[in-house]
């Protein structure tokens, strides 16, 4: 039986690797997701049978746990909208961290709060990272959903607080591991310290930097899954954790590079700290209507779409695809400029555009996009704000200063589709709206684009 389970896990591991590999391209992503889901389902079944080798009274607990998880998962998956996917990712990631922490708690209790130094240190590290990932992800969820506002989560001297809490946690892990035991009361204190660090890590981080934080939290959950796989002798969990943890760290580094932030700034939670008073932004905005924009697009040579979270909220991606089809039939070149942190999580815009069957070849990354935008006739900003904000280049006091942006300063004409003049997720106003080459088209992005599409078909 044990050999059969090991072979099954080996097959599931191969399927998981194949599935994750197929996720790297939109054309194979759906199939890859199904293969990876099958692999994980096999892993769950194997995990069900392993405890039954020694204990035959686990059926009730296993069935109850799986049933609750299946019911919640199915209902949530059917109801969640694409615009809420970042919040969903944060919740699932947080529960993954909590699961790893509970595995560590069970190990400590079953071993009567004792163990050799190496074992106890690894278990306590897993406990710490699990609770950090859990509470950090919950705070991220609150920020992404708008339930928690940055001004309500301010921590005085947040960097110093983070360093102190982290030192306390590391010292406690080393001390308990050296002694080889700990009491129940000290365990409670250690859990509290872990939760405090999860809070202080994420709470000070501003909205513009949230994709980087989500990536970091994902990597932490992956690491805890790998450690839990070792503790429970589950090879698939170990493999999945290693893949998620390593890819999450790589993605975090890429996100940091895209945001021009050092990794230590993520760890100590001092992102988005303004260096002074931001320059006042104001002036007169120029407006354009949908009919005039349609004419302008029809007589352009190059058009570029810059999508943001507003596009996700309006669910405008499919209409944009229709506009692309009409313009390309009239020999207008059509591209998409994708900022690495556009939206609320890494790859958010890519997923939405792939949902509308937009060719991956038309998506330009940051450097390609900036070169393309210099010779673009019309750039349409659909719900993006912070990723096109020139304050990142021009205002040293801005909280996003130093972040690479999609530079529209040399684009012939810029049209911003936006509901109002309210600031973006970072909470700062955008000087782009008052630039000479910029016009505003106010209203729901999808409805505005539908009017533009209708006008284009009639021209």
Image (tube, rainbow, N blue to C red):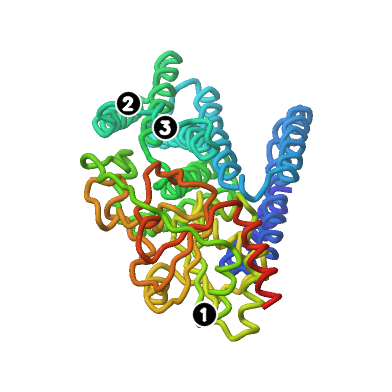
In terms of depth relative to the viewer, which is nearer, 237 or 167?
Answer: 167
Task: State the separation of the CA atoms marked 1 and 2.
Answer: 64 Å
Task: State the separation of the CA atoms marked 3 and 1.
Answer: 50 Å
Is residue 265 visible in the rendered structure shown here? yes
Q: Earlier in the sequence, mark 1 or mark 2?
A: 2
Which residue is most to the top? 185
Q: Secondary structure at mark 2?
A: helix
Q: Earlier in the sequence, mark 2 or mark 3?
A: 2
Q: Residue at x 68, y 49 (%)?
A: 43
In the picture of the structure, the residue carrying the numbered disc 2 is 172
Q: Is residue 16 above or below residue 365?
A: above
In the picture of the structure, the residue carrying the numbered disc 3 is 198
Q: Are marks 1 and 2 in contact (CB under 8 Å)?
A: no
Q: Nearer the viewer, mark 1 or mark 2?
A: 1
Q: Secondary structure at mark 3?
A: helix
In the picture of the structure, the residue carrying the numbered disc 1 is 300
Q: Residues within 10 Å of mark 2 (few under 14, many from 20)?
A: some
Residue 18 position within the rendered picture, expressed as x and y whole percent measured from the top left: 62, 66
Query: Where on the picture, by quarter, is residue 116?
Result: top left
In terms of depth relative to the viewer, which is nearer, 228 or 298?
Answer: 298
- In this rendering, the count of numbered labels is 3
């Amino acid at each position: 039986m044990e050999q059969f389970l090991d072979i099954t896990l080996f097959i599931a591991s191969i399927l998981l690797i194949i599935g994750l590999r197929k996720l790297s391209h939109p054309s194979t992503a759906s199939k890859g997701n199904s293969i990876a889901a099958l692999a994980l389902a096999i892993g769950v079944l194997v995990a069900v049978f392993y405890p039954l080798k020694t204990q035959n009274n686990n059926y009730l607990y296993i069935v109850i746990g799986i049933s609750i998880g299946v019911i919640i998962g199915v209902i949530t998956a059917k109801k969640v909208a694409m615009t809420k996917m970042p919040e969903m990712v944060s919740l699932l990631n947080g529960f993954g961290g909590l699961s790893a922490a509970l595995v560590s708690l069970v190990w400590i209790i079953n071993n009567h709060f004792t163990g050799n130094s190496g074992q106890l240190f690894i278990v306590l590290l897993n406990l710490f990272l699990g609770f950090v990932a859990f509470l950090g992800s919950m705070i991220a969820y609150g920020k992404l959903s708008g339930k928690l506002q940055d001004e309500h989560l301010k921590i005085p001297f947040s960097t110093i607080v983070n360093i102190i809490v982290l030192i306390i946690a590391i010292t406690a892990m080393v001390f308990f591991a050296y002694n080889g035991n700990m009491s129940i009361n000290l365990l409670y204190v250690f859990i509290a310290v872990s939760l405090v660090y999860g809070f202080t890590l994420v709470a000070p981080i501003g909205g513009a930097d949230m994709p980087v934080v989500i990536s970091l939290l994902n990597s932490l959950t992956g690491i805890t899954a790998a450690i839990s796989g070792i503790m429970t002798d589950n090879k698939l969990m170990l493999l999945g954790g290693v893949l998620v943890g390593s890819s999450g760290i790589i993605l975090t580094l890429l996100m940091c590079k895209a945001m021009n932030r050092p990794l230590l700034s993520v760890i100590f939670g001092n992102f988005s700290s303004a260096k002074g008073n931001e320059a006042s932004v104001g002036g007169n905005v120029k407006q354009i209507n949908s009919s005039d924009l349609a004419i302008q697009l029809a007589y352009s040579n190059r058009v570029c779409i810059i999508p943001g979270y507003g596009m996700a909220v309006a669910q405008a991606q499919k209409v944009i695809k229709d506009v692309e089809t009409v313009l390309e039939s009239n020999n207008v070149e059509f591209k998409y400029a994708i900022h690495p942190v556009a939206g609320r999580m890494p790859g958010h815009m890519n997923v939405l555009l792939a949902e509308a069957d937009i060719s991956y070849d038309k998506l330009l990354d940051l450097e390609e996009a900036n070169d393309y935008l210099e010779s673009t006739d019309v750039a349409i900003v659909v719900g993006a704000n912070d990723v096109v904000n020139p304050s990142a280049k021009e205002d040293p006091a801005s909280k996003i200063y130093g972040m690479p942006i999609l530079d529209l300063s040399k684009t012939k004409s810029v049209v911003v589709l936006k509901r109002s003049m309210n600031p973006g997720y970072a909470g700062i106003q955008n000087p782009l709206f008052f630039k000479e080459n910029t016009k505003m088209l106010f209203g729901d992005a999808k409805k505005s684009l539908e009017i533009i599409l209708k006008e284009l078909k009639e021209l």
